[in-house]
Amino acid sequence: MRLDDERESDNVEDMRGSSGGMGISGRHIGIGTIALALVAMYFGVDPSVVLNMGQGLNQNAPVEAKPIPKDDPMAKFVAKVLASTEDTWGKVFQASGHEYPPPKLVLFTGQIPTACGAGQAAAGPFYCPGDQKVYIDLSFYQEMKDRFHAPGDFAQAYVIAHEVGHHIQNLMGTSDKVQKARQSARNETESNQYSVRLELQADCYAGVWAMRADGDHRILEAGDVEEAMTAAAAIGDDALQKQAQGYAVPDSFTHGTSQQRMRWFNQGFTTGEVSKCDTFNVASL
C-alpha cells in the first residue's frame, strides 16, 4: 500500500503497556465477555481463557490513552488506514446528506475493558457498538502471517476496514435489526445465518472502502487485492474449523465460508457501491 503521504487519524487511542484499568472485583461474567468467548471459539481459541480472564474485571475503572509513539511504524500504519476509512465514509455519508461520526480505534495488549465486556487479545480484533470503538491487539497481525498464512499490509488494512464496516452497520441501524432477528430466530442455525449475513456485509463494506480510497488517493499496489482475498479466505468459517478440528460444521458458521467472504469483499471492491452490499435480500450468498 502507498500510505507514506497520507494523514494519520486523531481517533486512535493507545492503551498498550497498561493494565487497561482492570482491577479485581466481585462482578460476574457479563454478556460481552461471553460473546467474546464465542468469538474466541471461532478463532480456535479455548473460550475458557476468555471467560476466566473476564471474571473479576472492573470494567469501569478510568483509562487514559497515550499518544502514538513517533517511532512506531505499525501504529502509524493503523492510524493512516483509519484516516483513509474516515475520508471514504465521510464522503459516502455526506452524499446522502448525513455527517459521519467516525469510530475510535483502541490499541491494546492482552486485555481491555470495553462497553461490551472484557476485551481479550485472544478473541482477535472486534468492534463494540456500545462505545463505538474498534479494538485491536497488533500481535494479531503476526498471527495472521504465522497461523493464517495471510501476510501483507493490505491484508492488515482489510481487517481494520472490516471492523469499521461493523461501525457503519451500527450507524445505519443494521446491527440492531440483526440482533432482534437473531433473538426471535426459530433455532440456532437460523440465528447464525443472520450473523453470517452481517459479517459478509462488513466484508463488502471493506471492499467499498478499498475501491473508493484507491480512486481518490491511488493507495493500492500490485498484489494488494490478492492479499485481502487471501486474508478473507484464511478466516472463513470452513477454513478455521478445519484448521481447529479437522472438519467443518456449516450450521455453526457465523462469519461465512472462505468463498463467501472473498465474494462479498470483491462485490464491494468492484462496484464501490453501498447499495450492492445488501446481503440480507439475496437468495444465495
Image: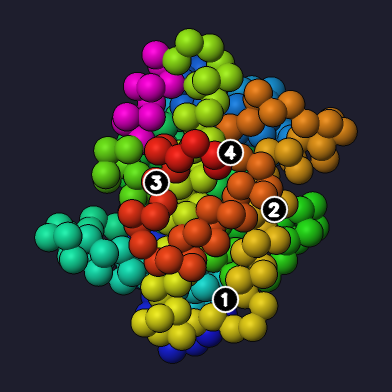
Residue at (65, 23) in percent of width and height: 251
Q: Secondary structure at mark 4?
A: loop
Of badges 2 and 1, nearer the viewer stands 2
Which residue appears farthest toward the right when viewing the image? 246
Q: Residue furthest bottom?
A: 5
- Taking the image as shown, residue 178 lies to the left or right of residue 121, namely left
Mark sitting earlier along the chain (3/1): 1
Question: Decide: marks 4, 1 in contact (CB < 8 A)?
Answer: no
Circle 3 sits on which residue?
A: 278
- State whether residue 152 appears in this view: yes
Q: Residue at x 32, y 29 (%)?
A: 177
Label 4: few (<14), some (14–19) or many (≥20) C-alpha neighbours in 10 Å: many
Sooner in the amino-acid sequence: mark 2 or mark 4 = 2
Residue 155 rendering spot, x and y as whole percentages: 62, 65
- Expressed as whole percent of the image width and height from the top left, the position of residue 72 reads 56, 74
From the viewer's perspective, is 149 left or right of 87? right
Q: Which mark is residue 255?
A: 4
The image shows residue 88 at horizontal and vertical percentages of: 33, 69
Instruction: Give me the disc on residue 233.
Output: 2
Q: Which residues fall within the magenta stretch?
A: 175-184
